[in-house]
Image (cartoon, rainbow, N blue to C red):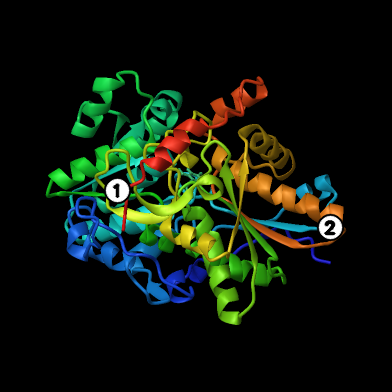
């Protein structure tokens, strides 16, 4: 029997198209609504924020969308990413399961985020845009856009959630190394930031607030557009190269996954690995078990409502139908900053509503325990966000052991944790609390959801 650990593809195997799951779903996504009128919006309403090519992808229905040559050329720097068989973890768990992971931490920024950052920077540069604004929680997205901006000659301004700005000076330094400006949010630069600071001068910030600031700057400057690192259809689309490569690599291994696992913040890395497999199953009239792992402190899929909501705290963004905890919901502090978002991607939410995924919520200590077990067997130290997927995959493998059934599990190891060592230090010192969200806050945030007819 082959003892292969890594399944590697040649650069020529980088997919030529992104995969659009809308073509294979039994029903399409709900329309996006204008924040003022609550009526469906047209492409021109989004033009102040995004270039037309990305708006077209946002509403695209065709199954395949060609990846432009210059984007594929940049992907060559780190793609195709390796697929590993976690043989050492399997032995440590003494499980009959076969565990595979797709490792996105080999990108320059250390996660899956450059897959879309490069595409977004390309389309903006092509449209003559000079500057991009964005938000970042953990710093992975901000640094990915900083890198992509440097390649395509764009200035990049990143509003970084205050608590992460203070906790993660090295992520900030990485953004600055690639030439971006990194501003702690809430900031006095924008109306949205000033309003929050007036009432909460010590605000630790949130992704929803940072999005409001970045959107405001883009909307007010003709040469500036906004880039989002997750949630939107075109972002999920760009991430599907992960799953498409994984399909070919699983075929090299002579196996097909029975279970696919990913962590979910806004839903992009999960969609990236899972959507091509879900689409193939839908086309074949079969089914596949897909597990979305989210933080118990910010559980949009397991505790949220499927409803129209704003994407940001300041209510500047259009409304989308998604699983949401309410835009007023502020999760308690925990170490997976990239998963602290009140909503879930509309397409992941639709897939959940169609019964095509299972969602699980995990507390952070359980996730860090899984991450360390993984590091001590496979060697790679996962990002705190990715630890949720590691937890989910280990739990599935342990269930196989209990049931005496050897299933094949594939999970997305979406990033490494080299800039997250404070989180590991805190975990090692027993300082991490499994903080619950405040149910009264959730109730109030859900009651404040916009009334859409
Ligand atoms: C390493 C990592 N994983 C996951 C996420 C969550 O985003 P998404 O659910 O869009 O993959 C983030 C977001 O910042 C991240 O940095």
Say if residue 87 shows up in the picture: no
Q: Residues within 10 Å of mark 2 (few under 14, many from 20)?
A: many
Which dot marks residue 23?
none
Percent x, y of residue 350:
47, 62
Residue occupying image coordinates x 53% and y 43%: 299
Q: Using a 10 Å C-alpha cutoff, classify the residue at mark 1 as few (fewer than 14 neighbours), some (14 to 19) or many (20 or more).
A: many
Residue 346 lies, with reference to residue 63, above or below; the image says above
Q: Which residue is mark 2?
A: 96
Q: Position of residue 140 (x, y in %)?
A: 44, 41
State the residue position of label 1. Answer: 149
On-image quarter of the N terminus = bottom right
- The reply, left or right, for residue 99 in relation to residue 416 is right
Give the residue at the far right of this rendering.
Answer: 404
**x and y, in percent, of residue 272 in the image:** 50, 60
- The relative height of residue 253 versus residue 45 in the rendered view (above or below) is below
Of mark 1 and mark 2, the one earlier in the sequence is 2
Give how far across and how far down residue 135 sits, in percent.
33, 40
From the viewer's side, name the closer residue of 364 and 252. Answer: 364
Looking at the image, which is closer to me, 286 or 57? 286
Question: Which secondary structure, mark 1?
Answer: helix
Please name the residue shown 61% across and 25% down the image. Answer: 433
Between the residue at mark 1 and the residue at mark 2, the CA separation in whole angstroms equals 45 Å
Secondary element under disc 2, as helix, strand or loop, is loop
Q: Is residue 5 left or right of residue 308?
A: right
The residue lying furthest to the bottom in this view is: 284
């Amino acid at each position: 029997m082959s003892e292969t650990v890594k399944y590697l593809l040649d650069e020529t195997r980088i997919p030529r198209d992104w995969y659009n799951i809308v073509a294979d779903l039994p029903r399409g996504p709900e329309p996006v609504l204008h924040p003022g009128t609550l009526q469906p919006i047209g492409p021109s309403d989004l033009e102040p924020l995004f270039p037309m090519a990305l708006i077209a992808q946002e509403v695209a229905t065709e199954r395949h969308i060609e990846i432009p040559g210059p984007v594929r050329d940049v992907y060559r720097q780190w793609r195709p990413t390796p697929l590993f068989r976690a043989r050492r973890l399997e032995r440590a768990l003494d499980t009959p399961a076969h565990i595979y992971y797709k490792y996105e931490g080999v990108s320059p920024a250390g996660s899956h985020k450059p897959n879309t950052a490069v595409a977004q920077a390309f389309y903006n540069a092509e449209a003559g845009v000079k500057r991009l604004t964005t938000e970042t929680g953990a710093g992975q997205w901000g640094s990915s856009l900083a890198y992509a901006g440097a390649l395509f000659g764009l200035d990049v301004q990143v509003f970084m959630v205050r608590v992460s700005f203070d906790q993660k000076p090295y992520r900030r330094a990485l953004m600055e190394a690639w030439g971006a400006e990194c501003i702690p949010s809430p900031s006095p630069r924008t109306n949205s930031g000033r309003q929050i600071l007036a009432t909460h001068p010590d605000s630790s910030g949130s992704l929803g607030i940072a999005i409001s600031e970045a959107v405001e700057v883009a909307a007010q400057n003709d040469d500036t557009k906004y880039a989002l690192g997750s949630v939107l259809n075109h972002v999920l689309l760009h991430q599907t190269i992960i799953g498409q490569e994984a399909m070919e690599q699983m075929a090299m291994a002579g196996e097909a996954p029975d279970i696919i696992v990913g962590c979910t913040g806004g839903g992009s890395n999960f969609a990236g690995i899972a959507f091509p497999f879900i689409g193939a199953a839908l086309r074949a009239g079969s089914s596949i078990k897909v597990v979305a792992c989210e933080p118990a402190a910010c559980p949009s899929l397991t505790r949220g409502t499927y409803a129209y909501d704003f994407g940001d705290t300041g209510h500047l963004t259009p409304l989308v139908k998604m699983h949401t905890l309410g835009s007023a919901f502020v999760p308690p502090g925990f170490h997976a900053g990239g998963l602290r978002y009140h909503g879930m991607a509309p397409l992941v939410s639709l897939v959940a509503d169609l019964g095509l995924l299972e969602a699980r919520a995990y507390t952070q200590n359980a996730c860090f325990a899984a991450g360390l077990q993984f590091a001590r067997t496979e060697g790679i130290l996962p990002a705190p966000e990715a630890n949720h997927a590691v937890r989910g995959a280990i739990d599935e493998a342990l269930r196989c052991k209990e049931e005496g059934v050897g299933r094949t599990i594939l999970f997305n190891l979406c990033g490494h944790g080299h800039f997250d060592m404070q989180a590991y230090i805190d975990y090692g010192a027993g300082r991490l609390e499994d903080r619950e969200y405040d149910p009264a806050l959730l109730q109030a945030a859900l009651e404040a959801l916009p009334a859409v007819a």
